[in-house]
Image: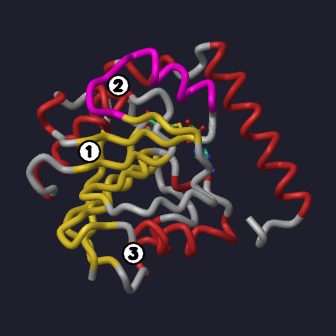
Amino acid sequence: MAKLSIIDKFHHWRRKRRWNKQYKKGKWDYLNNEREAVRYNKIVEYIKTYGTSKPVILDLGAGEAVLNERLNADDYTFFYNVDYSSASIEKAEEKGIANTKNLVADIHTYDPEETFDIIVFNEAFYYVHDHLKHEVLDRFTDKLSPKGVLITSIYKEGQNCWDIIDASPKLQQLNFETVNTDRESTYWKVGVYKRA
Ligand SMILES: C[S@@+](CC[C@H](N)C(=O)[O-])C[C@H]1O[C@@H](n2cnc3c(N)ncnc32)[C@H](O)[C@@H]1O
């Protein structure tokens, strides 16, 4: 995170601490509710439509592994849940999901050696620091296997997110949809991309 100023690093540390407190208090339990389900369902649909069969999946900013739970164990070969909140990863670990690894790591610096068939930013890309969004997107695009796809879900309009993703010379859009709910103000945009 060399590109962040000391002040940005401080805010980053404080935000991580806040996530941990919120997960411990159960503030994010609502992600399991029915209104949120439509977003996970769309991602699952994209995984099944555009992914290879039995993919290896990396979920960045995976929280408590809710997406992982929405898949059946035989839908994938291996599922990696990565989040910098140790409290969320502890909750993911307690679920004991088969063929899954839960890892505490920061998207800003996480640089796995392996490649993945599906990489997901599910309500996580907008938390990447603005100065680092291009670099992070490029780093993970390079981690896609030859037939790999990147799936992104972003709440509402996602300022400073879609313009970066859509302008990436390394990515080509395969689909993009708005997922609506029974509440007009609650919607997500979900896109799926392959390497250009
Ligand atoms: C709104 S929650 C979404 C959780 C999960 N993707 C879901 O939809 O169920 C955003 C998650 O991003 C994680 N996050 C934010 N910044 C991160 C970073 N720099 N590295 C790793 N995880 C991060 C937070 O800890 C949180 O779990």
Per the image, the residue denoted by label 2 is 35
Does ligand 1 reach within 8 Å of label 3's beta carbon? Answer: no
Circles 3 and 2, Cβ within 8 Å, touching? The answer is: no
Earlier-in-chain disc, 2 versus 1: 2
The magenta span reads 86-100
Residue at 63%, 60% in the rendered image: 109
Q: Which mark is residue 166?
A: 3
Q: Position of residue 144 (x, y in %)?
A: 31, 67
What residue does disc 1 label? 43
Q: Give the image quadrant in which the ligand numbered 1 is located.
A: top right
Q: Which is more toward the observer, 151 or 184?
A: 151
Which of discs 1 and 3 lies nearer the camera? The answer is 1
Is 96 included in the stretch rendered in magenta?
yes
Q: Position of residue 151 (x, y in %)?
A: 32, 56
**Is residue 163 toward the left or the right of residue 129 in the image?**
left
Q: Within 10 angstroms of label 2, few (less than 14), some, or many (20 or more) residues?
A: some
Single out the residue that lies furthest toward the right.
6
From the image, give the main secondary structure of the stretch colored magenta: helix
Q: Amino acid at mark 3?
A: Asp
Question: In the image, what residue type sits under mark 2?
Answer: Arg
Does label 1 point to a residue whose CB lies under 8 Å from ligand 1? no
In 3D space, how far apart are the residues under numbered discs 3 and 2 (Cα atoms)? 27 Å
Residue occupying the point 30% across, 36% down: 40
In the visual, does 177 lie left or right of 152? left
Q: Is residue 56 above or below residue 142?
A: above
The quadrant of the image that shows the N terminus is bottom right
> Mark 1 and mark 3: span between their CA atoms?
18 Å
